């Protein structure tokens, strides 16, 4: 039985296109996998703690050497990492805010990229010193953007600090099986936007089926 972790980071609860994408994913997944375990992590409408001095001191020393205050400072990070470890499938909904990601999602990423927990350092390989420690996971990045043209070779590619960044950080912690689907163009032509929404929803359903076929072989 697959375990799914759904993470939402839009500040909008109503009319959120990235939340709609995660919803389409869950509905289709559940229609095929009636016995799935699905957990949720809300980021967009909650306070995600920022890393602070105690957090940094604690994270870079052995667990046995941490003070009570330092252990406490890592509690949220421990919870988030445990959720990720447990999941086989991670579904992350993210809007583009100012060509990047919401600050709540950035704070979450700072909590989950933790040395000797989700990645370790290999000093013998200066060009790529990161060894990811989370294995055998698939990540679905379900994205929304007001404009368009952010894909490879398109006119806004150089402004895309959303999907490229997310792929990079999840790669570093060992997740390289990543699918990206985006709704684009909400701020422009309504008909074209509707096509983008419909296509993205169908793409999500297709990917759910592909993932199932792949894993059942
Ligand atoms: C604070 C803020 C910043 C945004 N910045 C961008 C941006 O840089 N580029 C873009 O294409 N759209 C931008 N948008 C539009 C959102 O990406 C778009 O509305 C998206 O659908 C939001 O995700 P949601 O529907 O899941 O809430 C921004 C929206 C907000 C609220």
Image (cartoon, rainbow, N blue to C red):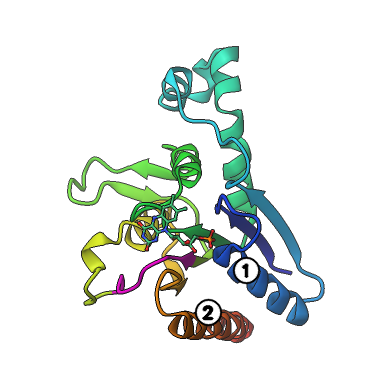
Q: Quadrant of the N terminus?
A: bottom right
* Marks 1 and 2 in Cβ contact (< 8 Å): yes
What's the CA distance linking mark 1 and mark 2?
Answer: 10 Å
The residue under label 2 is: 197
- The residue positioned 75% from the left and 75% from the top of the image is 30
Answer with the quarter of the image where residue 68 lies.
Answer: top right
Q: Within 8 Å of ligand 1, the CB of disc 2?
A: no
Magenta stretch: dominant secondary structure: loop
x then y, percent, for residue 200: 51, 80
Q: Secondary structure at mark 2?
A: helix
x then y, percent, for residue 5: 64, 58
Answer with the quarter of the image where residue 69 lies.
Answer: top right
- The residue positioned 55% from the left and 12% from the top of the image is 67
Please say whether residue 28 is one of the residues in the magenta stretch.
no
Q: Which residues are magenta?
A: 143-151
- Viewed as shown, does residue 181 lie left or right of 149? right
- Viewed as shown, does residue 94 lie left or right of 72? left
x then y, percent, for residue 115: 41, 37
Q: Earlier in the sequence, mark 1 or mark 2?
A: 1
Q: Within 8 Å of ligand 1, the CB of disc 1?
A: yes
The residue under label 1 is: 20
81 and 99: which is toward the camera: 99
């Amino acid at each position: 039985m697959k375990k799914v972790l759904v993470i939402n980071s839009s500040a909008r609860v109503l009319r959120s296109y990235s939340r709609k994408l995660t919803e389409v994913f869950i509905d289709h997944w559940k229609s095929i996998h009636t016995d799935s375990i699905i957990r949720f992590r809300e980021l967009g409408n909650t306070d995600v703690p920022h890393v602070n001095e105690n957090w940094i001191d604690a994270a870079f020393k052995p667990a046995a050497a941490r003070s009570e205050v330092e252990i406490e400072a890592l509690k949220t990070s421990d919870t988030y990492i445990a959720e990720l470890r447990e999941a086989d499938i991670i579904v992350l909904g993210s809007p583009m805010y100012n060509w990047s990601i919401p600050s709540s999602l950035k704070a979450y990423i700072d909590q989950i990229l933790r040395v000797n927990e989700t990645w370790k350092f290999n000093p013998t390989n200066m060009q790529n010193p990161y060894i990811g420690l989370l294995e055998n996971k698939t990540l679905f990045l379900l994205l929304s953007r007001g404009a368009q043209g952010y894909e490879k070779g398109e006119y806004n590619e150089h402004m895309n600090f959303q999907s490229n960044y997310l792929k990079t950080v999840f790669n570093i912690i060992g997740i390289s099986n990543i699918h990206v689907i985006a709704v684009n163009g909400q701020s422009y032509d309504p008909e074209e936007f509707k096509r983008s929404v419909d296509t993205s929803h169908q793409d999500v359903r297709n990917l759910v089926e592909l993932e199932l076929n792949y894993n059942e072989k």
